[in-house]
Amino acid sequence: MTDVDKAVDANDGLDAVDPVDTAKNLEDWKWEGGDAQRPGTMADRMADSMAAETRHAAPTAKDGNPIWRAITSDRGARWTSWLVILIVWQIAGQASEKFPTPLGTVEHLVKEFQAPYHGPWSVWNNQLVQNIVISLWRALAGLTFVILIGVPVGWAMGRWWRVQAYFTDGVTIGLALPAYIWAMLAIMVFGFGMKAPIFTVVVSATPGLIVHVLQGTFAIPRELQDMTHVYGVPFQRQVRNLTLPSMAGQLVAGVRLAVLAGWGCVVLVEWFGSNGGVGYQARDWYLTANFNGLMAWALVMIVIIVFIDRVIISRIDRRVHRWRGAVGGFGGGSRAGQQRGGGDAVPADSTRD
Amino acid sequence: MPTLTADVAKKAARNRWKARGYSLLGALTLLGLWWLASLYKPTEFELIPGPYEVAQRMWGFAVGDAARGVEPGWVFLNFWETFGKTLYGFAGALVLGVPIGILMGRFRYWKAFFFDLIYITANVPLVVYAILALILFGLGDTGPAVVVAFMVLPSITLNVAAGVEGVDRGLLLMSQSYDRSTRQALQHIVFPTFYPFLFAAVRNSFASSWKLAALTETFAGITGVGVQIGVAFKGFATADMIAWMLYFGVFVVAIERLGLMPLERWVFRYRLKRGEDVLRF
């Protein structure tokens, strides 16, 4: 029995006749959407464990050489790896005619930063910043719709088995379809502007979020749900004190996945046809065979998603989990605690587009 | 209480049929929405083809369509090409990722060393991978395989690392004190610990690796599904594109259900016998 089966059975504890058939189909969702996991979770856990090791590691007086100690420390290892990457990149760039060097890439970024967008140059009004703003704005608009659709649908799927059965096929297919074909179709149908990126982001990122939210609802302890029912707790309080706290981890995980997918979609749409934005710039420089420019904008794509993930979502995530940790996930013995338990060693990134 | 059990079983069966009905209803709703969208014609071009037209195209791709110059088995031919590249990519990722994962799980220095690199490869948007393949390898089959390897790498590495970290140190000590060789320790203690993690990694990244392979082919390929999709895009053949897209869904779901899941059950059948769930990891 998978976790999902168990969760469904747990939900059926008091109402044994609920059909579990859709749960059979859902069996694989643990894989496709991930079980209590998100991209970078493993990375997060490793980062946390490394930080903890650093805190608790007693300084060893035996390795007296301070330089050697600095090199073999965690920070030293990270700097070494960055240095190795940069050197390899520089050598690759110098060896091949087309491949850009890191220096050329940075130079190009500076050039973009110095070029005015419309009218006079300012720190705000230049090619680099304005194109990033355009792309971010598109991603934000798309993700708003993703969250507005994905969270209620996912929650409803967890709440009513009829809704779950109704949406199962759609979500399964949605997970399997590649985002870039959606992007091409959207451009053909909607043309330039906001509609194409929003459509693509909604179509490609929502199924992943729905799966996460659905699994989040499985983590709501059934006993407490029944108790709120018996004691007639008002809906608002239920949401605030039971539903949201139980689902918080999965919710953040789903949003994180959606943000990653959404940014990828926006950039794709801009590459295939648009009138501005990061992807458009990359395409533009590619068409003029300026590989420094192409690499520079590709770097911008990476830096922005890493920034959003590390600085914004990671922080929210840690906050959410600290809170959960304090409550103890409703106690390790409860179903919620068990749900959080096993089998969460897998980053689920299969809904990446 | 036999009567009660029978009643419950009957009711469950009835509800299972009901759920199937709702599932069907959901699928029909999707088809209906598609059909409605196909009626939308902002310009004189027929941009969104209806379900029937696309079904015809899909049929044509499978059995051949003489009128449109499509060979029989065209779709299988193209998917086979893409599948081959995905497999090469996976092989590359395994060859690179397993040693790195073992290093990361075993030594703290290497964990810190590879950490940022793995984290970034896990977060790079797919389009950037496609661009890199285009710059580095130009047109050809190498690019798609290499970027698939890079995209799968973090998932494999992190899972192997987690598996290796979870190795029972006590067992390792025991194997030492009983004078077992390193090879034996690896074979009987370390590898079995991370196999489940490795499988999880492979299955998790399978769908997205295929998507990336096709995308890279559209950018820089000469054979495969991606190229066909690119051709359809350039010719504004929306019906062809949707047909390819749906085939994509069919193949991904089919391979996961018919290939990977049974394989996983088979590999971990000893766990099934013990009553444990295979797919837990």
Image: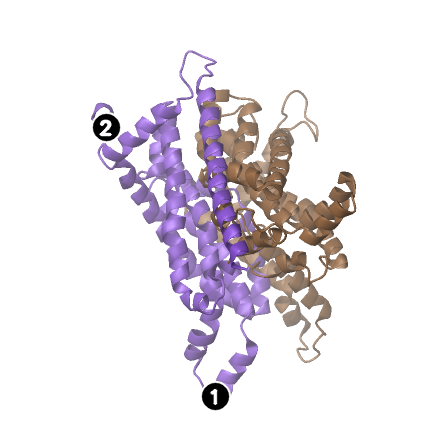
Chain colours: A brown, B purple
Residue projecting furthest to the left: B66
Foreground residue, B280 or A286? B280
Name the residue beneath numbered marker 1. Answer: B178
Pointer 1 chain: B
Is residue A304 visible to the viewer in this orientation of the structure?
Answer: no
Expressed as whole percent of the image width and height from the top left, the position of residue A51 reads 68, 62
Q: Quadrant of residue A287?
A: top left
**Quick one: label 2, few (<14), some, or many (20+) residues within 10 Å?**
some
Write down the quadrant of residue B50 in the picture.
top left
Under circle 2, the secondary element is loop
* Horizontal side of residue A349 vs B213, given as left or right: right
Query: Residue B115: x and y, percent?
Result: 57, 58
Q: Nearer the viewer, residue B280 or A122?
A: B280
Q: Which residue is label 2 attached to?
A: B65
Going 53% across and 72% down the picture, which residue do you hit? Answer: B167
Q: Quadrant of the N terminus of chain B?
A: bottom right
Kind of residue at badge 1 = Tyr
User: On screen, A264 above or below B193?
Assistant: above
Disc 1 is placed on an element classified as loop
Tell me the subunit letter for badge 2.
B
Q: Position of residue A232 (x, y in %)?
A: 78, 43
Q: Residue at the spot x=45%, y=59% of the render?
A: B199
Residue at the farthest top position = B44
The disc, 2 or 1, on the residue closer to the chain's N-terminal end is 2
- Quadrant assignment, res A235: top right
CB under 8 Å between callouts 2 and 1? no
Residue B19 shows in the view? yes
Q: Nearer the viewer, mark 2 or mark 1?
A: 2
> What type is the residue that disc 2 sits on?
Asp
Distance from the alpha carbon under mark 2 to that under mark 1: 68 Å
Q: Position of residue A14 (x, y in %)?
A: 63, 52
